[in-house]
Amino acid sequence: MLATLTPYFPAWAHEWLDSLLLVIQLLIIVIGAWLLQRGLRRILRRASARYDLPVHLMKPTASITRWIIVMAATLLVLGRLGVSGTVLWTAFTGFAAVGAVAFFAAWSVLSNIFCAMLIFTARPFRLGDHVEILDTAEKPGARGEVVDISLLYVTLRDSTEEHPGALLQIPNALVFQRIVRRWKGGPPRQPAGNRPSVLSE
């Protein structure tokens, strides 16, 4: 490509063509990464508005996406600047190994975050619903109104007679490992035999 462009430039500019071409390539990488980041951020905003995803879930997703793009662009820039591919590959595998160790060390936290994303997208329940988290269908479990869904916990306001009004924090991953009984929009109705009778005078 450089040999094709050389005849179109004066002789004094020939020694600068290599540097000019390198600068153009670096600008293309940087601008491409910037445009990709803006496009993905716009897509995340539209997805958040369409599916009513919470802000505290979208912010870390956008940050992770941004850092992945920055790292990829940095590797491309270093490659164009003449850094050896072996050095880049060694650095990449080193970071990947550290990331893998950190991933397994924080597996419980990451699994809760992933399950939070599933809760917001699959919608097994919503804020205001009354749910019961059961080990089995026969045994009673944690029951209450869903008052908060965070990246790590689902918070229920206990509706049992033993601890009325107490807040229960259930890890998100546990929701997908248990049976969930759900009542939409209000507390479950008591059977007629369990309702308190009204005695007339």
Image: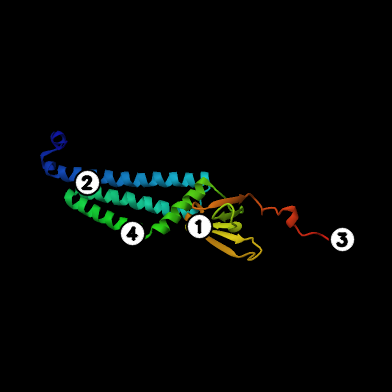
Q: Secondary structure at mark 1?
A: loop
Percent position of residue 82, x then y: 16, 49
- Side (left or right) of 47 relative to 134: left
- Side (left or right) of 51 relative to 99: right
Percent position of residue 58, x then y: 45, 52
Residue at numbered disc 4: 102
Give the number of the mark in front: 2 or 3: 3
Q: Amino acid at mark 2?
A: Val
Give the number of the mark in front: 3 or 4: 3
Q: Earlier in the sequence, mark 2 or mark 4?
A: 2
The 10 Å Cα crowd at callout 4, few under 14, some 14 to 19, many 20 or more, is few
Alpha-carbon span between mark 4 and mark 1: 22 Å
Give the number of the mark in front: 1 or 3: 3
Picture residue at 63% right of the left edge, 64% below the top = 165
Q: Earlier in the sequence, mark 1 or mark 3?
A: 1
Picture residue at 82% right of the left edge, 60% below the top = 198
Q: Quadrant of residue 18?
A: top left
Q: Earlier in the sequence, mark 3 or mark 4?
A: 4
Residue at numbered disc 2: 23
**Contact, CB < 8 Å: mark 4 with mark 1?**
no
Q: Residue furthest right?
A: 201
